[in-house]
Image (cartoon, rainbow, N blue to C red):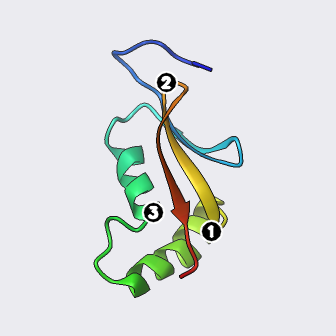
Amino acid sequence: MKTDTNNQNPTYEIRQNGKAVLQSDCEFSLPMIFNNLTGRNFAKKSEYHDYIRFIAIKEMGFTYGEIELVKNGEVVAKGHITKK
């Protein structure tokens, strides 16, 4: 289901359990946050787990489990927020 077909100002979302947790028109911030949430931007596992516990869960409202990066209503990437 497409929610926005304007290619000049794409809408990005990070969804969990079918609901948008974060939404933005910025083409850089949500893909970067998605990579943070899936651990791609961290060299140490301890840094990733601290980010998940203290930022993603407490501040952003995510939980452990699957997430999706969505651009203009279409899923462009899937990942997991993990405990270990």
Of callouts 1 and 3, which one flags the residue occurring earlier in the amino acid sequence? 3
Residue found farthest to the bottom: 46
- Looking at the rendered image, the disc whose residue lies closer to the viewer, 2 or 1, is 2
- The structure residue drawn at horizontal position 42% and vertical position 46%, both measured from the top left corner, is 30
Q: Give the structural element (helix, strand or loop) at label 3.
A: loop
- Amino acid carrying mark 2 in the image: Asn
Residue 61 x/y as whole percent: 66, 60
- Amino acid carrying mark 1 in the image: Ile
- The structure residue drawn at horizontal position 57% and vertical position 18%, both measured from the top left corner, is 2
- Report the quarter where the N terminus lies: top right
Image height of 3 relative to 83, above or below: above
Name the side, left or right, on which 1 lies relative to 23: right
Q: Pick whichever, 58 or 62, lies toward us.
A: 62
The residue at which mark 3 appears reads as 38
Q: CA distance from mark 2 to mark 1?
A: 25 Å
Residue 29 x/y as whole percent: 36, 46
Q: Badges 1 and 3: C-beta atoms under 8 Å apart?
A: no
The crowding category of the residue bearing disc 1, from other C-alpha atoms within 10 Å (few below 14, some 14 to 19, many at least 20), is: some
The residue at which mark 1 appears reads as 57
| Label at residue 72 | 2
